Image (cartoon, grey):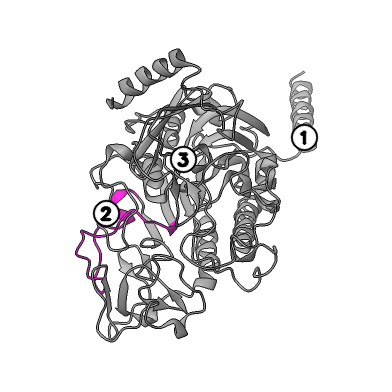
Amino acid sequence: MKRNHILSCTILLLFALLLAGCSGPAAPAVPANPNLVIIYMDDLGYGDVSAYGTGTLQTPNIDHLAAEGLRFTSGYCTSATCTPSRYAMLTGQYPWRNQRAAILAGDAPLLIDPQQPTLPKMLAENGYKTAVIGKWHLGIGDGQVDWNKPIELTPNAVGFEYSYVMAATNDRVPTVYVENHRVANLALDDPLFVSYKENFEGEPTGKDNPEMLKLRWHHGHNHSVWNGIPRIGYQKGGKSAMWIDEDMADNFLNRALKYIEENKDETFFLYYALQQPHVPRTPHPRFAGTTGMGPRGDAIAEADWCVGQVMAKLKELNLDENTLVVFSSDNGPVLNDGYYDDAVEKVGDHTPSGPYRGGKYSLFNAGTNVPFVTWWPGQIEPGISDALVCQIDLMASLAAYLGIENTGPDSQDILDAFLGKSEKGRDSLVLEASRRIAFRSGDYMMIPPYEGNPVNTNVNIETGLYPEYQLYDINADPGQQNNLAEEMPEKLEEIKVEFEALTGIE
């Protein structure tokens, strides 16, 4: 009897093992906390992504990301210029609350207070490895930087364990990369000097030495020349550390891929901030001439390829089911932004702003309504969402997912909207352009009266500055052609009250 019982148990055990073998390998467990990758473009408009169905430029890799993820039609940055939007996304605070949150010079001091709560700091305190690779433009140092010595106040001071960035923008000096606390590849026998006040004796400029230029300046970019391109600001020396513009995309991409590879067994946050299609647009020769739209179109094609490479790396390493990817842009589009590069002449039928009015520098909708995609296989169902969402809300929403305190003062928990579990996003949003603000409430956008030029003549973009109130129904009138302020005075008054209560501005 005992032997029969043992035999029966043995048969049952073998049967159970057989069933386990037939069921295949167990699916890998998804850790509670996902990796986070923010892919952040620079000056990419709503209509520049072909997934939005408005422009004629093709972006197949971004389209594929959008097809596998959730594409937002009302996805916003906070500002129509770069520094304020980046500040808001990383701090969860509206940029208009900080008087310094404007476009910064290349030698401006660090904009984010090291004591201030930030998204990378929040994640680092909760077990994440954190890195920023690409464009920074949030200030470095204390305003008196010696570029030849260790720099204390870099992105590392606000929560990033690793940083490899350009200090400001590719059209501003210094034209060098900063890795953690030092200028990368800087030779001590050729020190680097930077000034935004006056030129260094004997150094050529774009204004005085046009024979040196491979790219002509249109406005505001006629100071120091490097790589045949005139910049904003003056620099001297540091030749060993100078970047080659055409290699910049590959350089940032390779470091991003390396970071993902090296941290594949960790939980990580990568802020991958591409420089395209910001001026000067200098695509690698592999992409030059491929779109027929000049360097701007080619730079977007190059960036699209970079996005595809990052997504391929995540899938290659089997990280896709445990990685939340957020793709967006820091502000709306601009064609001529300081150089003659055929962006205006070769745009053709392409519509960078999509159906919207305005662009970079503008209070109209195209200044801040940008491409916006969230992607997380198994957690986010592919689709399209009309929820009102903003980059400033990533901080609160991730805090909610992680079960920790949200320390972003203006950041709201709209996690369900980001994950596609709800069509309800924000109720309202304050938007900014050049220190002036507008307000979106539900489907309506209100622009208060402002003095100023209604057209930015440098870039040929409508600013939205008019001496009377403007009120638009964005869904019914995406081109903002029908000002409803006089037709709907009660609605205007309701929104004004809401705006004043939120901002304290009358």
Q: Identify the element where label 2 is drawn.
A: loop
Please name which of the two marks, 3 or 1, marks the residue nearer to the observer: 3
Q: Is residue 28 left or right of residue 502?
A: right
Residue drawn 41% across the image and 27% down it: 469
Horizontal and vertical percent position of residue 503: 31, 27
The residue lying toward the viewer, choosing from 22 and 32, is 32
Disc 3 to disc 2, C-alpha distance? 21 Å
Residue 134 in the image: above or below residue 146: above
Residue denoted by label 2 = 110
Q: Which residues are magenta?
A: 133-159
The residue lying toward the viewer, choosing from 503 and 135, is 503
Q: Main secondary structure of the magenta part?
A: loop
Q: Identify the element where label 1 is drawn.
A: loop
| Residue 149, magenta (yes or no) | yes
Q: Is residue 278 left or right of residue 240?
A: right
Residue drawn 69% across the image and 53% down it: 57
Identify the mark nearer the N-term, 2 or 1: 1
Residue drawn 59% across the image and 60% down it: 344
Residue 209 in the image: above or below residue 155: below
Horizontal and vertical percent position of residue 280: 49, 66
Q: Which mark is residue 77?
A: 3
The residue lying toward the viewer, choosing from 21 and 289, is 289
Residue denoted by label 1 = 23
Which kind of residue does numbered mark 2 sit on? Leu
